[in-house]
Image: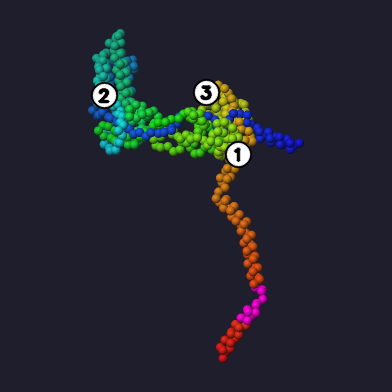
């Protein structure tokens, strides 16, 4: 009776699970990949028509206006001074900082360097000139001229039309606005030159580059700076651009892991579903070139081996186990999928949904509006809901225990034969040779000993005895002659 119970318990364990919808992969995210890449060259021209003359004209004009402002008689009134006297301080600071940036930029564009430029495709940045600065200073002086140093406190307070207040406010607004533009323009310009000099492409130029007529489809490109030339109030830089020209929209798959076993795809390869054909494909990413796009990674889409492809498309679990390759890989313990499901693949994970303990088999995907807590080897990880989940559900595997065991056995067998290397083959070959030639060697040794023994104890023939006697007679005669 006990044996029967043990048998039934084992059989129930073998067929447990298998009532879910998960198999060997689950959809992760939709992305765009590049299938072909075009290499373009372009030269960017960065003129600097602002000289030290224009910079000096601006700084002189600003200094004059701020000096007159601070000396206005109406600022002797505490209330007026509290409201207006310090209103130009921030603008004055920005003018000084912007001036420092423009002066530093002059060093880049005036230094003479040589480097070969090859591209016939060029685009030029808009720049600021001495004339532009002259007009800005003229406008600022005009606004400042409406604030008169002859105003007194009584007249200001008696001004019912508020024209004096308006003149003060207008000067503050124009002065600070121009200061911001001067600072931002000068320091952004310097940043562009700094980056290019360090072989980095400034992102603020990307939009202008994309509108260049001689470069097609440059929305998604990576740009490398090959080198720059300076001199004659200009910096010219040679750029190399990678432009994807053929695209594919794919859905990446996350491989499900069963006790350390999952589909074997190869190095730098992902399982994807081609949105164009609707079929599962292998996306080989491999090595990238220096001008490869980061936003649209380049890959090669290939078909899966036919038996495995048919099995995966039909979701025939036994056929997948039989026809596809698997490998032993340590699973990602737990991760949040792009559709906000929590995928748990660590075999020893303990899972709670809020206060409810989940006992379903691993792997498991949980969609819930409650806090998910996963504990692995004493380490606790929590996953709060980031967006509302429309349908709370728990996805479990379709695989029965007997199928998981078959999967593990397949990988164990493959690993055994893979580790059955040359040395092991040689060991078995030597054993086989010993088994074949060992008895022959022993037999040959015995036969040799038998022949020698037989020869040793065999009686001499009449001929041999006659020869021996003659030899003895000759020796005796020789001895006698030596004695005489």
For the point 63% across and 34% down, the residue is 401
CA gap between label 3 and label 1 equals 37 Å
Which of the colour schemes (rainbow, by chain, secondary structure, one colour) is used?
rainbow
Residue that numbered label 2 is attached to: 133
Pointer 2 or 3: first along the chain: 2
Pointer 3 or 1: first along the chain: 3
Q: Residues within 10 Å of mark 1 (few under 14, many from 20)?
A: many
The answer to whether residue 293 is above or below residue 450 is: above
Magenta segment boundaries in residue numbering: 456-468
Residue that numbered label 3 is attached to: 387
Residue that numbered label 1 is attached to: 408
The answer to whether residue 434 is above or below residue 96 is: below
| Residue 350 figure quarter | top right
Residue 217 % position (x, y): 38, 28
Residue 276 % position (x, y): 48, 28
For the point 65% across and 79% down, the residue is 462
43 lies left or right of 362 = left
Residue 428 % position (x, y): 59, 52
Residue 460 is one of the magenta-drawn residues: yes
The answer to whether residue 177 is above or below residue 238 is: above
The answer to whether residue 433 is above or below residue 133 is: below
Q: State the quadrant of the C terminus.
A: bottom right
Q: Main secondary structure of the magenta part?
A: helix
Dot 2 falls on a residue whose secondary structure is helix
| Residue 209 figure quarter | top left
Viewer-side residue, 429 vs 30 = 429
CA gap between label 2 and label 3 equals 52 Å
């Amino acid at each position: 009776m006990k044996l029967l119970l043990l048998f039934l318990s084992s059989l129930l364990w073998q067929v447990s699970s298998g009532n879910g919808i998960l198999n060997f992969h689950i959809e992760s995210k939709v992305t765009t990949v590049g299938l072909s890449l075009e290499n373009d060259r372009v030269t960017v021209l960065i003129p600097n028509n602002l000289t030290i003359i224009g910079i000096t004209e601006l700084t002189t004009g600003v200094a004059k206006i701020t000096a007159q402002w601070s000396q206005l008689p109406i600022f002797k009134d505490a209330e007026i001074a509290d409201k207006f006297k310090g209103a130009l301080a921030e603008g004055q600071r920005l003018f000084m900082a912007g001036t420092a940036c423009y002066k530093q930029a002059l060093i880049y564009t005036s230094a003479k360097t040589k480097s070969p430029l090859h591209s016939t495709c060029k685009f030029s940045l808009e720049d600021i000139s001495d004339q532009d600065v002259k007009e800005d200073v003229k406008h600022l002086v005009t606004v400042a001229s409406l604030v008169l140093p002859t105003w007194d406190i009584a007249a200001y307070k008696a001004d019912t039309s508020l024209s004096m207040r308006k003149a003060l406010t207008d000067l503050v607004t124009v002065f600070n606005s121009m200061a911001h533009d001067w600072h931002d323009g000068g320091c952004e310009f310097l940043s562009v030159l700094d980056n290019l000099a360090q072989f980095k492409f400034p992102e603020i130029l990307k939009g202008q580059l994309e509108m260049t007529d001689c470069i097609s489809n440059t929305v998604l490109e990576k740009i490398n700076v090959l080198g720059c030339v300076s001199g004659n109030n200009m910096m010219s830089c040679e750029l190399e651009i990678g432009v994807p020209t053929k695209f594919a929209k794919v859905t990446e798959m996350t491989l499900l892991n069963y006790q350390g076993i999952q589909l074997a795809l190869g190095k730098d390869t992902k399982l994807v579903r081609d949105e164009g054909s609707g079929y599962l494909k292998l996306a080989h990413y491999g090595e990238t070139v220096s001008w490869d796009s980061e936003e649209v990674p380049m890959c090669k889409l290939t078909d899966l081996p036919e038996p495995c492809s048919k099995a995966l498309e039909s979701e025939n679990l036994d056929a997948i186990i039989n026809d596809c390759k698997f490998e032993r890989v340590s699973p990602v313990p737990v991760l949040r999928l792009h559709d906000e499901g929590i995928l748990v693949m660590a075999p020893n994970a303990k899972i709670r949904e809020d206060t409810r303990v989940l006992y379903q088999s691993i792997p498991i995907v949980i969609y819930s509006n409650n806090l998910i807590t996963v504990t692995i080897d004493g380490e606790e990880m929590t996953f709060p809901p980031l967006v509302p989940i429309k349908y709370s559900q728990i996805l479990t595997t379709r695989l029965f225990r007997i199928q998981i065991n078959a999967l593990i056995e397949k990988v164990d067998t493959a690993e055994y034969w893979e580790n059955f290397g040359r040395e092991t083959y040689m060991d078995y070959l030597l054993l086989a040779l010993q088994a074949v030639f060992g008895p022959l060697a022993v037999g040959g040794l015995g036969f040799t000993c038998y022949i020698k023994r037989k020869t040793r104890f065999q009686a001499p023939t009449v001929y041999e005895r006659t020869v021996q006697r003659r030899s003895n007679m000759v020796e005796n005669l020789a001895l006698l002659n030596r004695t005489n």
